[in-house]
């Protein structure tokens, strides 16, 4: 059985479905601060049986000790954390407490329970403003421009030290590029609780008429069309990267770092055009100045993940956008039904 912290969230829920699809068991620990209990029901529907679910906080050492004692957990996927960049600037202590503090407590409880296999949700943000593309795992980590990114780098450093202190640890740091998309069933996806900061969730709300226009931040970057370029990766591909990492870590000790990206970058305008093409829905937009802290380009060199995990992303940008739109339309329908009642 694996424990997934933050397993009711966008990425953790997809990891749960992937792992359960293999006939394995999952226990989810989540305090639902950025997700809803209905995610657990949706995971059950997709997996054909319910995952274990415990409502609670990953910083709660006593709770973790109990879970690690009472359930046959042999690995942990640590997705629980706060992820809004702007919010992290306003509330840095909450971010360090949850993200760094949560990771420290989790590692302590795991070590005490004798569970040493850990997969961590890291981020390409730890590379900072790396200018050489594509970014491989050997690129030095940079100086993230916000407390969120800093907290991810700190977590990585905590885990590196922990792995160095005891040879029984097997830790995989998964550096996600830009996860988007949704489960093809339309049952699982990203459900922002406040105004979205990221491109795709915002674009989806413009497409469904909840917001008027998409602001395109910066058209003067040194990129082919002047807008920022990112490596968007389908969340189901990303989830499969976790199952491959969990398998690989059975045979590896110490720290392993893997990029989870496609190796291909798309500009903001390319994403908008592709979305309009696959859905037929026009996206009104305005050009705005660059967003502070943004970099021009960021895409992965995914070769190490292919060589060591046998993993590579398979979904095209078009399929990411189609799946994301299906999810958004379902959400919208449910919201209307809820309001009507
Ligand atoms: P999410 O907010 O959808 O999921 C995180 C989950 O963790 C939520 O269900 C939330 O309720 C839970 N959680 C938060 N604090 C908790 C706590 N103290 N105790 C227990 N549960 C807690 O976010 P996501 O997109 O699924 O991201 C998952 C992880 O991946 C995060 O650590 C995030 O930093 C990282 N990440 C995300 C992205 C992205 O673009 N989505 C990119 C890189 C890395
Ligand atoms: C993508 C591109 C924007 C919104 C962030 C975090 C990173 C990681 C993923 C967690 C950029 C442009 C965006 C909008 C726009 N998260 N954009 N209008 O900035 O690459 O990464 O999410 O780890 O840490 O920093 O993703 O989706 O915000 O932006 O033009 O309304 O879209 O300028 O070029 P980003 P994003």
Image (tube, rainbow, N blue to C red):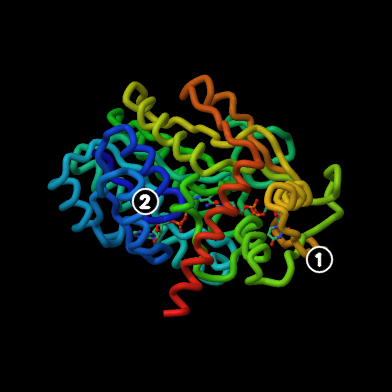
27 on left or right of 152: left
* Crowdedness near tag 1: few (<14), some (14–19) or many (≥20) residues, C-alpha within 10 Å: few
- Residue drawn 68% across and 52% down? 279
The picture places residue 202, in percent across and down from the top left corner, at 64, 62
20 up-or-down from 28: above or below: above
Answer yes or no: do the residues labelled 1 and 2 have beta carbons within 8 Å? no
Q: Is residue 125 above or below residue 293?
A: above
Quadrant housing residue 59: bottom left
Placement of the C terminus among the 4 image quadrants: bottom left
Q: Which mark is residue 103?
A: 2
Q: Nearer the viewer, residue 314 or 266?
A: 314
Residue 42's tag is: none
Q: Nearer the viewer, mark 1 or mark 2?
A: 1
Residue at image coords 63%, 30%: 301
> Disc 1 or 2, which lies upstream in sequence?
2
CA–CA distance between discs 1 and 2?
40 Å
Q: Quadrant of ligand 2?
A: bottom right
Q: Residues within 10 Å of mark 2 (few under 14, many from 20)?
A: many
| In this rendering, position of residue 26 left or right of residue 273 | left
Is residue 98 visible in the rendered structure shown here? yes
The residue positioned 46% from the left and 72% from the top of the image is 337
Looking at the picture, tell me which residue is in the foreground, 306 or 8: 8
Q: Is residue 147 left or right of residue 171?
A: right
Q: Residue sitting at 67 percent across and 38 percent down?
A: 299
| Residue topped by disc 1 | 286
Secondary structure under tag 2 reads: helix
């Amino acid at each position: 059985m694996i424990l997934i912290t933050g397993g009711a969230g966008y990425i953790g829920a997809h990891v749960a479905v992937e792992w359960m699809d293999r006939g394995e068991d999952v226990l989810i620990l989540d305090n639902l601060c950025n997700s809803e209990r209905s995610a657990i029901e949706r995971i059950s529907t997709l997996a054909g049986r319910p995952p274990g679910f415990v409502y609670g906080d990953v910083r709660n050492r006593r709770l973790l000790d109990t879970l690690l004692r009472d359930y046959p957990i042999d690995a942990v996927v640590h997705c629980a954390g706060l992820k809004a960049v702007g919010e992290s600037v306003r509330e840095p202590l909450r971010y360090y407490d949850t993200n760094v503090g949560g990771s420290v407590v989790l590692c302590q409880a795991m070590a005490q329970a004798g569970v040493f296999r850990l997969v961590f949700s890291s981020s390409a943000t730890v590379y900072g403003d790396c200018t050489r593309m594509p970014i491989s795992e050997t690129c030095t980590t940079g100086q993230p421009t916000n407390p969120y990114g800093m907290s991810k780098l700190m977590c990585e450093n905590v885990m590196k030290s922990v792995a160095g202190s005891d040879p029984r640890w097997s830790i995989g740091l998964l550096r996600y590029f830009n996860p988007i998309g949704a489960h093809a069933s339309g049952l699982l996806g990203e459900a922002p609780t406040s105004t979205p900061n990221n491109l795709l969730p915002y674009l989806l709300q413009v497409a469904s008429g909840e917001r008027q226009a998409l602001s395109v931040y910066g058209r003067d970057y040194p990129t082919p069309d002047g807008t920022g370029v990112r490596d968007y990766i389908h969340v189901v591909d990303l989830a499969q990267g976790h199952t491959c990492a969990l398998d690989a870590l059975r045979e590896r000790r110490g720290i392993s770092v893997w990029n989870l990206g496609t190796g291909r970058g798309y500009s903001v305008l390319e994403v908008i055009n592709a979305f309009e093409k696959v859905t037929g829905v026009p996206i009104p937009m305005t050009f705005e100045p660059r967003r502070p802290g943004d970099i021009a380009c960021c895409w992965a060199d995914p070769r190490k993940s292919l060589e060591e995990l046998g993993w590579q992303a398979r979904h095209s940008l078009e399929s990411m956008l189609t799946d994301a739109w299906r999810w958004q339309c379902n959400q919208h329908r449910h919201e209307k039904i809820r309001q009507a009642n």
